[in-house]
Amino acid sequence: MKKYLILSLAFAFALTTKAQIFLQKTSDGSMLWLNKQCYNTCLVKGMTDKDATLSIAKDELTKYYKGKEVSIRIDPLLNLGEGYMLTDSSIIASSSIGILYGAYDLLRLQETGNLSHLSKTEKPAVNLRILNHWDNLDGSIERGYAGKSIWKWDEIILDKTGEFKNISKDLRNRLITYARSNASIGINGAVLNNVNASPQMMTSEYLHKVKVIADIFRPYGIRVYLSINFASPMALGYTKTADPLDMKVQLWWKKKAKEIYASIPDFGGFLVKANSEGQPGPGDYHRSHADGANMLADALKPFGGIVMWRSFVYGANHKGEDRVKQAVSEFKYQDGKFRDNVILQSKNGPLDFQPREPYAPIFDNIHQTPQIAELQITQEYLGQSKHLVYLAPMWKEFFRFVSPDKLKGIAGVSNIGDNANWCGHPFSQANWYAFGRLAWNPSISSEEIAHEWLIQTYECKDERFTKPVEMMMLTSREACVNYMMPLGLHHIFKFDHHYGPEPDGFKAEYPLEWCPVYYHQADSNGIGFNRSSDGTDAVGQYPEPYRSLYDNLATCPEEYLLWFHHVPWNYRMKSGSTLWEELCMRYNMGVSMVETYRDYWHTSTKEYMKDHITEWEMTDSLLNVQLASAKEWRDVCLKYFQTFSKMNIDE
Ligand code: GCW
């Protein structure tokens, strides 16, 4: 009896340890690209002081670097800023954050097998590399598809006097993982709340909680910024107006800035959406954007803070004008009127984060005000967290037109939520990763980034897995353009949620600029928005050679054709097909690309993802969803456009 007992105990023990090992190995995606084997063998030399950032660097190297020894040296005279010099056994930097970035780079190179003959110097392309969270204080996220906000404001407890008392362990750990992941790819700032901002964000209660987050982020080189509601002092009951030229309003913001910096000395500054989509702004008092931005800039200036003022403004002063022209119309004549700590933040395209847009000409029209490019990581218009769409090629396309040298910063609207795997779709993590890598160095190729991410995330270097999956990632954005909006079509999404197709979308109660029919302009003659010089002349906002290139139907790149021109259905495309045939071909191609991804994933990848089965299964089932959506896009759009073209739909 005793023998059986011992045997069964041993068996049970074996089972549980096996199960434990299995549990440890089975990833739910929560470790992102930081799945690393722990070695604990590396000796880190040259640590002189008790700097929190250096301690993190030391810890990362000690645990995860396979090399025997790494020496660290800080030399401020090298003027490397946040950059570093790296070999396989040394990191030299001008600052402790440079050392930490160097440490993460070393580990990345180790994981991707690129350590031999290592000797390089790295410096970030732009100083501001910031995630913009569109998180609301109630925990919801505007355009968030991966759960609720990760800022659990209720889990940061203050005492009666407003001082910090406690933060849940879970929250602290998650915030550390967030900061660590960002630092590992060079992101150095986070705007915590939605640009459609609640005035409550400026209350002392929330600011105390923000301080707790800022303290956790600081050693990882992440500065905290906040979006502000322009009417905050009035909405909170302190002033009767929010007029930026009113003394009491100015004073309120000055005091607020002082209060913020007293507890967060490295606070980054404010992000502002003003007089846009119903948000309050200086225009409510017949003041200019410059008046509004400068008032805030003056309040932040003594403490080194900046104002990131968004140019995403339409339907106000230039109502009725082609929406894609309005930002330039509004801001061109205010250029030169902003304080030197104001930065204009503009989306990559002139409309609104479409799967493909020509670059926003505001980047060429503003010369005296520094600019930030705003990219969207969350896939509002690209299948949200249901479609596998790798965004690096889209952002690289933008950098072909807008050189990072012209920019002060790059911002990315975050796709992060409290889902276990952070981003919803397992492959959406790659977009967070790619954003950071490109903000650091926009010249890294999409291929390289996909490769790095894949190897680190799924811990598999076998080319039979990596090559085809990378190919899937690299072609996925073009597939999405094809099944949603080929040839320059844009904004034909379903109202409000922006997921599926609604080419016949029109609502009399909505502004015309929200209605799909306004954007495709399909009629019996053809389809597309005439923005050429005999149309709305949006082409006129581009410098040469683009102005003439886009203006002329014969030279306009076909990927922008229907963005700039209204084109007859039987127009001959470069392929020799008519426009209608080409449209059918593109929609079909988009669908068959997704079909190929789905089939390949299902039949040929599982064996390489044994330790990531949850992520494999999720991707497998989401590819079916994506395929169904792609078919829906094709069928709905082609059937609707056929009512105008009266031509046969080619299979
Ligand atoms: O794309 C639109 C989104 C809004 C968003 C707005 C903006 C935060 O549909 O949800 O609001 O852009 O960028 O301000």
Image: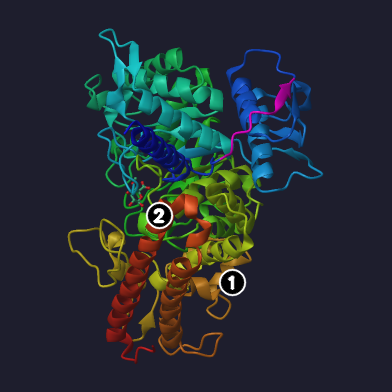
Is 39 situated above or below 532? above
Q: Residue 401: x and y, percent?
A: 60, 58
* Quadrant of the snapshot with the C terminus: bottom left
Q: Residue furthest top?
A: 161
Packing grade of label 1 (10 A; few <14, some 14-19, many >=20) is some
> Mark 2 or mark 1, which is nearer to you?
2
Main SS of the magenta segment? loop
Q: Residue 108: x and y, percent?
A: 64, 42
Amino acid on which disc 2 is placed: Gln
Residue depicted at 61% across the width and 55% down the height: 451
Please state which of residues 624 and 402 is positioned toward the viewer in this rendering: 624
Is 466 situated above or below 167? below
**Label of residue 549 in the image:** 1
Please state which of residues 54 and 61 is positioned toward the viewer in this rendering: 61
* Sequence order check, earlier mark of 2 and 1: 2
Which range of residues does the magenta coloring cover? 36-45
Please state which of residues 534 and 422 is positioned toward the viewer in this rendering: 422
Amino acid on which disc 1 is placed: Leu
Q: Is residue 453 left or right of residue 616?
A: right
Which residue is denoted by mark 2 in the rendering?
379
Is 600 situated above or below 9? below
Packing grade of label 2 (10 A; few <14, some 14-19, many >=20) is many
Element under label 2?
loop
Is 190 situated above or below 419? above
* Quadrant of the snapshot with the N terminus: top left
